[in-house]
Amino acid sequence: MLDLGLDVLFKGSNMLRLLQGLWVAMQISLVSIAVSMPLGILCGGLMTMKNKLVRFIFRVYLEIIRIMPQLVLLFIVYFGSTRVFGWNLSGETASVIVFVLWGTAEMGDLVRGALISIPKHQYESSEALGLSKIQTYRYIIIPQTVRRLIPLAINLITRMIKTTSLVLMIGVVEMLKVAQQIIETNRMTSPNAAFGVFLVVFILYFLACWPISMLAKYLEKRWR
Amino acid sequence: MKNLKKFLALSLAVVLTAGVTACGSSSDNGSQKSGKEVYRTLDEIKEDGTINIGVFSDKNPFGYVDENGDYQGYDVYFAERLAKDMGVKVNYVSTEAANRIEYLQTGKVDVILANFTVTEERAEEVDFADPYMNVSLGVVSKEDNEITTLDDWNKDDSVIVISGTTAETYLTKNYPDIPLQKFDSYATAKEAFENGTSVAWANDNTEVLAFALQNADKGYVVGIPELGSSDSIAPAVTKGNDTLRDWINEEIKTLGEEQFFHADYEATLADTYGLDYEDSLVVEGGKKSE
């Protein structure tokens, strides 16, 4: 059988360390998701406003976040904040800030897209039926928007979880970093460990993202 | 049409602003310290009781984490002693080759002991203490396609390097025609090399010697054991942090009397490089023998 070097995971507390690494990654992503989803929805609402200035500001914000690689944002927030303002943020805090900024911007744009994709006649028909503005949103617009939003939002959420693998560049020891440490420590005794360890990392990321995909599927079915 | 033009102009403006902001925050302020210093002096560290030392966490045998989650290796062995003699605890920070300078310039660590090779460019950004090790570059390749020279390079072949290392700088400067494959970490570079994505891997000669020694049965050889001039590996502190640097220099000198780095080598490196290379790799008391 092919030697995957899985035995290195059972040395000392290696498996536990890998799981702790996953926990670090999940903490960063879940906190960021919990903060950025509501903020993103608010942002998306504001982006559809008629006010030119508001729209301009959000446009600039979105474009800046979108064109900057997350790694650059991490460096700017983690090292830049120390250089310019003298703040000493921990790697975890810096990661959460970057992920919240990123999540809010992209979620905002998704919400904006979903809102403007609702045809104008939906609003007009509601008005013709005598529904008030609040009723229109409550019963007509928001349910349709949410249904369109779910697959897009899930995509963003799983992307945020997977992108935590970048935070090792600012000294946060998360799952991928622990995996590299384990592989390196055993590079003489189990040179094949990379296969096994990365396979386990793959499975763990999958287990972290899969329930979210399932939830989305369930919600899509239920709200059809 | 008018709207499109407006939009394009707007996008351009945004890109430019973002670009300027990004460059500004990463290149400015590098050397200027307006009023308040970013680093901690020797006394401040002693008062605090903890020294922050940046080490590699995935570079066996220099700095790595063992199966119990403890830092180990040649650099760590020295770091432990440094902290003990200073009378403080150590807080290890896991650094990557590419962010070591940034860590010092922002004062997020007090000392970098991460196999840090002294170069002129780096010496402008950080202050190096006296060396404790000697290295040059080496190139490892497959036996059946041994690379013994970098001249007359076949343009279809590439060389693997790790971003931010001396090997990358050296090759970019002296052999700009050789295509490089760059990786962020040792683990990924090694993985790629073993999968045969490049014909050669350039790195510190200690690294390639060790790699070839362990993988001799798979036919890896060091075709070029010494490339370029020999370099020193030294502790680095934030630019201007003289009290800390002087203390480290003094410490290295004292440790030389007890042949500390030979003991360090035997405890951490001998398994990897064998005892043949001990005297050529170790620098004792901060002074090179040549």
Image: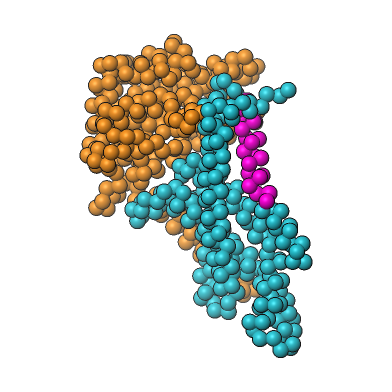
Secondary structure character of the magenta stretch overall: helix
- Horizontally, residue A204 falls left or right of residue B91, namely right
- Horizontally, residue A212 falls left or right of residue A21, namely right
Residue A118 inside the magenta-drawn segment: no
Q: Please give the range of residues in magenta.
A: A192-211
- Horizontally, residue B29 falls left or right of residue B19, namely left
In the image, what residue occupies the spot 66% across and 45% down? Answer: A207
The C terminus of chain A, quarter of image: bottom right
> Which corner quadrant of the image does residue B52 belong to?
top left
Q: Position of residue B11 (x, y in %)?
A: 55, 65
In the image, what residue occupies the spot 74% across and 66% down? Answer: A223
In the image, what residue occupies the spot 43% across and 27% down? Answer: B72
Residue A206 inside the magenta-drawn segment: yes
The shade of chain A is cyan
The shade of chain B is orange
B283 vs A162: above or below? above
Residue nearer the viewer, A193 or B174: A193
Q: Does any portion of residue B254 appear in the rendered image?
A: yes
Residue nearer the viewer, B92 or B140: B92
Q: Position of residue B86 (x, y in %)?
A: 26, 31
The N terminus of chain A, quarter of image: top right
Question: How does the figure colour the protein chain or chains?
Answer: by chain
